[in-house]
Image (cartoon, rainbow, N blue to C red):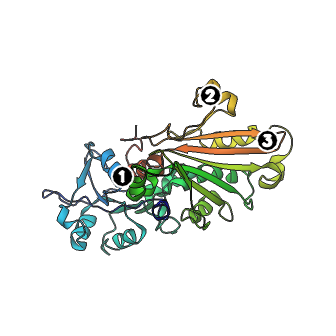
């Protein structure tokens, strides 16, 4: 059971549709970053695939907003290509919460003369496609603008979000070598495996914990390499635990083999690694770099019973926390990211990207 569900673990495995009300009238979008203004009070949004975990959470975050008009299809039309195409082309923005092949098919339903509708794809299908903006706004100073200007946005994978949040700034700051041969481990809540794995873990008998991904070809690896700045992906060792939501992604670093020689010289290497991450995210709302090291975490109450870093502390939020702990004497360090696999790792990121694409405060419905 675990192998069957785990094979698809990595977002998303969803399939249902929302769509249009009888009174809906399509309207053109203003330019990026000014799409919702006093003259355009509501944006029409179609969620193509809401039966799974991500789609349901996206709908939940949008359903109470007075600046979003959710387009909904009747149940009997949810798999009708003509009805879906009509909904997609009426919408100002579409969030695709579908398996990869279905997401590709849905993207092809956009009419050739429709240069207005924004697509946000939560599947793996378009994440390394140069024609799609990668939907991690905190990636660099320019990434938010790329998302705002694009009609095609690829939502990051949950594991990839954690990994890239750690390595992207460190490679960019000249701390970690592009040629570093890294290993990363991660543990996620079982909701990341979609309805099949949820059924296993919420059934009568199930594993307490399980490692998977033994082919070493997890589908998040291409984006991990493409957006971390590394010249190749890490060896990735994912696992799922007996908890619904939450995730910790950890990357060990050896000063002498993984860091740039000039960066690794002298004392205080761990402090410099921490400072590089803190500087990168200094102005970000959703990504926070926590104090350096275990003793500080204990003082700040960040560890369960003063010892354990819980993976589920950020559940139902779009926040991501970065932890750095080092042993300068041993010349080793670990950087770790904690996030909600269904929040910043999926639905929260989709809504954040939607807000940016529509020119809204990106924190809307994410607090």
| Label 3 sits on residue | 269
Q: Position of residue 33 (x, y in %)?
A: 40, 51
Q: Which residue sits furthest right? A: 266
| Label 1 sits on residue | 358
Picture quadrant where residue 14 is located: bottom left
Q: Nearer the viewer, residue 275 or 342?
A: 342
Q: Position of residue 335 (x, y in %)?
A: 67, 45
Q: Earlier in the sequence, mark 1 or mark 2?
A: 2
Q: Position of residue 265 (x, y in %)?
A: 85, 45
Q: Secondary structure at mark 3?
A: helix
Structural distance between the alpha carbons of marks 1 and 2: 43 Å
Structural distance between the alpha carbons of marks 3 and 2: 25 Å
Q: Residue at x 35, y 48 (%)?
A: 57
Q: Residues within 10 Å of mark 2 (few under 14, many from 20)?
A: some
Q: Earlier in the sequence, mark 3 or mark 2?
A: 3
Q: Nearer the viewer, residue 345 or 87?
A: 345
Q: Which residue sits furthest top? A: 299
| Label 2 sits on residue | 306
Q: Residues within 10 Å of mark 1 (few under 14, many from 20)?
A: many
Nearer the camera: disc 1 or disc 2: 2
Nearer the camera: disc 1 or disc 3: 3
Structural distance between the alpha carbons of marks 1 and 3: 42 Å
Q: Earlier in the sequence, mark 1 or mark 3?
A: 3
């Amino acid at each position: 059971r675990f192998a069957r569900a785990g094979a698809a673990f990595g977002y998303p495995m969803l399939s249902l549709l929302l769509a249009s009300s009888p009174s809906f009238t399509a309207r053109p979008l203003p330019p990026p970053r000014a799409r919702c203004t006093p003259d355009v009070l509501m944006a029409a949004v179609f969620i193509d695939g809401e039966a799974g975990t991500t789609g349901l959470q996206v709908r939940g975050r949008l359903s109470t907003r007075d600046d979003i008009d959710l387009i909904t299809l009747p149940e009997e039309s949810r798999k009708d290509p003509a009805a879906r195409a009509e909904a997609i082309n009426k919408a100002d923005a579409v969030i695709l919460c579908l398996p990869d092949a279905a997401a590709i098919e849905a993207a092809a339903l956009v009419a050739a003369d429709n240069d207005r509708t924004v697509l946000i794809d939560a599947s793996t299908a378009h994440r390394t496609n140069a024609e799609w903006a990668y939907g991690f706004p905190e990636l660099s100073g320019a990434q938010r603008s790329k998302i705002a200007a694009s009609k095609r946005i690829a939502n990051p994978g949950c594991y990839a979000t954690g990994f890239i949040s750690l390595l992207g700034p460190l490679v960019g700051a000249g701390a970690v070598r592009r040629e570093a041969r890294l290993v990363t481990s991660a543990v996620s809540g079982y909701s990341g495996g979609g309805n099949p794995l949820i059924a296993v873990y919420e059934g009568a008998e199930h594993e307490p914990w399980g490692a998977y991904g033994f082919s070493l070809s997890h589908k998040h690896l291409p984006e991990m390499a493409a957006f971390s700045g590394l010249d190749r992906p890490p060896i990735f060792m994912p696992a799922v635990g007996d908890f619904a939501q939450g995730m910790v992604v950890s990357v060990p670093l050896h000063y002498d083999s993984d860091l740039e020689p000039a960066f690794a010289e002298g004392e205080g290497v761990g402090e410099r690694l921490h400072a590089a991450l803190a500087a990168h995210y200094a102005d970000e709302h959703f990504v926070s770099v926590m104090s350096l090291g275990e003793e500080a975490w204990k003082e700040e109450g960040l560890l369960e019973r003063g010892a354990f870093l819980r993976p589920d502390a950020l559940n139902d939020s779009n926040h991501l926390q970065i932890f750095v702990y080092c042993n300068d004497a041993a010349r080793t360090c670990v950087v770790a990211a904690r996030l909600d696999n269904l929040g910043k790792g999926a639905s929260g990121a989709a809504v954040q990207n939607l807000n940016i694409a529509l020119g809204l405060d990106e924190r809307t419905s994410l607090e």
